[in-house]
Image (tube, grey):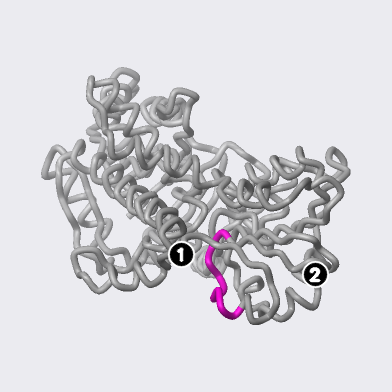
Amino acid sequence: MRISVAGTGYVGLVAGVCLAEKGHQITCVDTDEDKIELLRKDISPIFEADLEELMKRNRMAGRLYYTTDYQTAYKNAEAIFIGVGTPEQPDGSANLSYIATVARQIAETIEEDCLIVVKSTVPIGTNDKVEQFIHDFLTHDVRFEVASNPEFLAQGNAVHDTLFASRIVIGTESKWAENKLREIYKDFEPPIISVSRRSAEMIKYASNDFLALKISYINEIANLCELVGADIEDVTKGMSYDRRIGEYFLQAGIGYGGSCFPKDTKALKYLAEKHGYRLRTIEAAVDVNREQVTKLFRKASDRMITFEGLKIAVLGVTFKPGTDDLREAPSIENIALLLEAGADLYVFDPVGCTNLKKYYSEKTYGNLHYTDSVYASLRDANICFIFTEWTEITSINPEQYKEWMRTPIVYDGRNVYAVDAMKAAGVEYYSIGR
């Protein structure tokens, strides 16, 4: 099928490449000419496992194209996927301006019957508005319908999560639209869940917010474990054998980040308030996460007289391993606090430092230094903070902290090490819930 995809970020690019992998003719559209030129060279603007390999294979097979010319891309498309950003606004609501721009471009361009598929995460009822908006500006007498098809990919595993998803959710208001989407996904293995548009929109928010709630819950239990002398890892192991609970998203740490959980929890909270209802569980998840992010900094502040002039190793800055995304990463706020406190920061991340420089440049902050190895960060350091559990970091053994650091004091936000192992190595070690 001839499919165009609006937007080449995480959602749009991964969707387009994976649809091409299943045999569709895909044209990816973006307004950024520099990004399009990179894509044409099989260079992904995002760090994502296996993505560039699939980009190259499908481009060479003649199934994948990139352009800034949306008129040509949309004109005769059988389906158009919208995968542009819906960033958070100050009040927690979603910014739908990019959706609106693409919707109007589609309305003024399509010349054949076309299914418009919204993959972007949007508030409940947005697909209805997009359909009306396109109808208001429609130039040619063609049949179209808007469908909801939310994504459930995890950054770092986005390609796998798209090709081998646990389910494919489609939200439609007619058999014509449903059958079109079923045809698009006929070669995908996951079960297709067909519901109304509004139910599909809600499934996305309800799923993400439940996982965020689970993370905040276990972080609350971890904080209580520290107070009563229990070990959170023993607790979660015992919980995980209950099939009703499971083992996933029970890892205690310094909070969730990324492009989905923070934004989606706030958006659903905003939506509920708009309808005169309080989602108290979601409010609690948001509040717990806000406090959890700086938990280790507060612990270190209680331990130290001052951070002024101390060499601080920061290991990992992305919100999780396998991605270069820093959106809502716990490291960002902690780095700001440490810089403000006068610490000399030596930062290592295998892929995230390029993006971090957009927040903190060495020219602006004289006490900030980027390193190319864990050793360079740890050498003669007074304190180490671990914010991301990259393999390059977890492969360092406890004895090396003792050997490399001036004073081996480690604050671990991801519970990478066994407490006993760090103690035996002579490391003063602080983690979460243990």
- Residue under the point 74% across and 68% down: 408
The image shows residue 176 at horizontal and vertical percentages of 15, 44
Which residues, given as a range, are shown in magenta?
413-421
Query: Of all residues shown, which one is farthest toward the front?
Result: 228
Side of 20 relative to 40 (left or right): left
Could you say which quadrant of the image residue 399 lies in? Answer: bottom right
Amino acid tagged 1:
Asn
Does 431 appear above or below 366?
A: below
Side of 383 relative to 158 (left or right): right
Q: Which residue corresponds to mark 2?
A: 405
Q: Earlier in the sequence, mark 1 or mark 2?
A: 1
User: Does the magenta stretch mainly form a helix, a strand or a loop?
Assistant: loop
Amino acid tagged 2:
Met
* Res 264 visible: yes
Q: Which residue corresponds to mark 1?
A: 157
The image shows residue 362 at horizontal and vertical percentages of 84, 45
